[in-house]
Amino acid sequence: MTIEQANHKLKLARIRREKITAEIRKINDFLRRKGMDSHSIIARRNKEIFKLHLKGMKYSQLAICYSLSAETISTICKIQERKRINRKKYQIND
């Protein structure tokens, strides 16, 4: 690959990125108008992943189901576990 070819590929990739970013904005705007946003959708997905993991699904299985890496699934489950512990801690103190 030459420098010119690399610069051309980079320019095309940036154009694709701009189109994708615009599409993401449109989808997020639509979801907000419907009372949802991407953050609540992801939060719901993460809770579902954690529940399935608690039922015995392995990180690798969940990774395939959700098209995420096993490392990401592991991180999601660790965060959800911390949230669960904090909820329990505050419920006991009430």
Image (tube, rainbow, N blue to C red):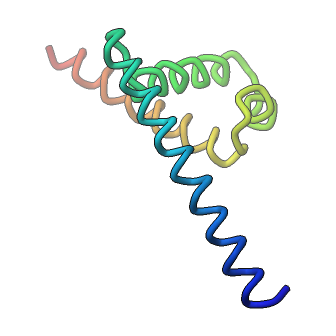
Q: Position of residue 65 (x, y in %)?
A: 77, 26
Q: Position of residue 13 (x, y in %)?
A: 65, 62
In the picture as drawn, the residue positioned furthest to the left comes out as 94
Residue at (69%, 15%) from the top-left corner? Answer: 55
Please state, as top left, top right, bottom left or bottom right, where the N terminus lies in the image.
bottom right
Residue at (47%, 31%) from the top-left corner? Answer: 80
Q: Position of residue 63 (x, y in %)?
A: 74, 35
What is the tally of numbered marks visible in this picture?
A: 0
Regarding residue 84, the answer to whether it shows in the image is no
Indicate whether 68 appears above or below 39: below
In the picture as drawn, the residue positioned furthest to the right comes out as 1
Q: Position of residue 79 (x, y in %)?
A: 46, 38
Horizontal side, residue 40 vs residue 21: left or right: left
Q: Nearer the viewer, residue 25 or 35?
A: 25
Q: Nearer the viewer, residue 61 or 41?
A: 41
Please state, as top left, top right, bottom left or bottom right, where the C terminus lies in the image.
top left
Residue at (73%, 80%) from the top-left corner? Answer: 6
Q: Nearer the viewer, residue 9 or 81?
A: 9
Q: Nearer the viewer, residue 90 or 1?
A: 1
Regarding residue 1, the answer to whether it shows in the image is yes
Horizontal side, residue 24 vs residue 1: left or right: left
Question: In the picture, residue 87 is in which quadrant?
Answer: top left
Horizontal side, residue 31 vs residue 60: left or right: left
